[in-house]
Amino acid sequence: MSATIFGPDGQPRCRWCAAAPEFMPYHDTEWGFPVDDDHRLFEKLCLEGFQSGLSWRTILSKRENFRAAFLGFDFDRIAKFTEADIMRLLRDDGIVRHRGKIAAVINNAQRAQELVKQEGSLAAYVWRFEPKATELAAPQTASTSAASIAMSKDLKKRGWSFVGPTTVYAFMQAMGLINDHAEGCVFRDRAEAARTG
């Protein structure tokens, strides 16, 4: 089976983006393009944690609700959340109401603040783990890598939670640390140009 499908414009794209209507715009405008904004990086790490055990479609369809509930994923504001905020979020049917995952976002916001003090920015830290081209598996054939295992281990050592190697690998794919667009996908070259430009 081919790793690509043709989109409505006749251009080949990663096969997975045809699985749901909301996937194609996400694939075409976000997935695999490099991100160096701390709040977007934090948001994606959090949303990947929420996805654990669920489908990305569920999370993507609720993303705007998550953004509202977690104040745009501003980790300086989330770090001040209290038990009352956890209770409020557990009543919010616009998000995934999982106490452990909600608590993880608050904990990770506090850890993000510490990391920014040490590293200057979340982006500076994250991009240190960008793998060399020679370390990459063929596109869309892996669910972890040496780099995702290393980042996961380091984040856990720093006290982060819901950041296993598979979660971190999905984060790295989405945020452009890895160009995992399929060979032949029209967006592979565009993502690579954005990464190297």
Image (cartoon, rainbow, N blue to C red):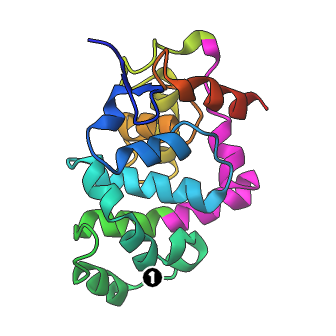
Label 1 neighbourhood size at 10 Å, few (<14), some (14-19), many (20+)?
some
Q: How many marks?
A: 1
Q: Using the rendered image of the protein, determine whether residue 195 is visible from the camera's viewpoint.
A: yes
Q: Kindly indicate the quadrant of the structure image that contains residue 167.
A: top left
Look at mark 1 in the image and give the residue it sits on.
Answer: 81
Relative to 39, 53 lies left or right: left
Answer above or below: position of 44 versus 102. Answer: above
Residue 162 percent coordinates (x, y): 35, 51
Name the dominant secondary structure of the magenta segment.
helix
Dot 1: element: loop
- Amino acid type at image mark 1: Phe
Looking at the image, is 170 positioned above or below residue 25? Answer: above
In magenta segment, residue 69: no
Quadrant of the rendered structure where residue 70 is? bottom left
Residue 146 vs 100, above or below: the answer is: above
Q: Horizontal placement of 185 versus 119: left or right? A: left
Image-based side of 70 in relation to 49, left or right: right
Q: Which residues are magenta?
A: 109-133
At x 30% / y 80%, what residue is drawn? 89
Between 169 and 4, the one nearer to me in the picture: 4
Image location (x, y in percent) of residue 174: 49, 40
Across and down, in percent, residue 152 comes to 46, 38
